[in-house]
């Protein structure tokens, strides 16, 4: 508190959770709200994924395979839908033992069409 996520505002934080769930088939859940001296804190959960951090090349390949093009530093834009995804550094992904790359904390600036 008083900030929520990378963009600071509660409505943006909650919208990002909804968009991330929709775009990446994530399962981020709102568990509750805790009161505090500096303001409320939002409590979320998401599935635990066992794996390793990907390389930058693996992240680039993952976005490219889905039709995204680089649109700045750690930012990608989907050529067809216009979706814009930020904060796409390797620390925000996990590669599972079977090689599947899973996003865990991306910022969806726009979900596109």
Image (cartoon, rainbow, N blue to C red):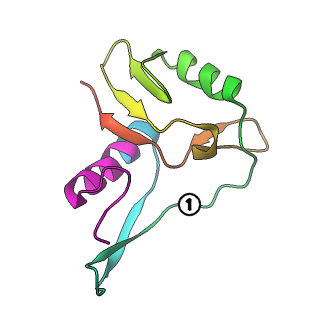
Quick check: 49 above or below 37?
above
Image x and y of residue 99, in percent: 75, 35
Name the residue rendered at 33%, 75% in the picture: 41
Kindly indicate the quadrant of the structure image that contains residue 37.
bottom left
Q: For the point 60% across and 42% down, which residue is it?
A: 102
Nearest to the observer: residue 13 or residue 101: 13
Image position, residue 105 (x, y; %): 49, 49
Query: Mark 1: which secondary structure?
Result: loop
Q: Quadrant of the N terminus?
A: bottom left
Could you say where residue 5 lies in the image, as x and y percent from the top left?
37, 57
Residue 42, relative to residue 113: is it above or below?
below
Q: Residue at x 54, y 23 (%)?
A: 63
Quarter of image, res 48: bottom right
Is residue 5 shown in magenta? yes
* Residue sitting at x 23%, y 57%: 9
Q: Work out whether 15 lies above or below 68.
A: below
Judge whether residue 38 is colored magenta. no
Specify whether 113 is left or right of 95. Answer: left
Is 72 on the left or on the right of 38, as rendered? right
Residue placed farthest to the left in the image?
Answer: 11
Q: Position of residue 61 (x, y in %)?
A: 63, 20
- Mark 1 neighbour class, 10 Å CA radius: few under 14, some 14 to 19, many 20 or more: few
Q: Which residue lies under the disc numbered 1?
A: 47
Please give the range of residues in magenta.
1-20
Q: Nearer the viewer, residue 101 or 74?
A: 74
In depth, the one of 55 and 2 nearer the eye is 2
Q: Is residue 65 left or right of residue 99?
A: left
- Work out which quarter of the rendered image holds the C terminus and state it: top left
């Amino acid at each position: 508190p008083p900030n929520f996520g990378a963009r600071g505002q509660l409505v943006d934080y909650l919208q990002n959770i909804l968009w991330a769930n929709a775009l990446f088939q994530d399962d981020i859940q709102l568990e509750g709200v805790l009161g505090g001296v500096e303001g409320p804190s939002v409590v979320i959960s998401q599935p635990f994924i066992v794996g390793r951090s990907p390389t930058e090349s693996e992240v680039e390949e993952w976005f490219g395979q889905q039709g995204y093009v680089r649109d700045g530093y750690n930012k990608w834009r989907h050529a067809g839908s216009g979706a814009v995804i930020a904060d796409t550094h390797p620390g925000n992904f996990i590669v599972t033992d079977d090689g599947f790359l899973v996003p865990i904390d991306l910022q969806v600036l726009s979900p596109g069409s």
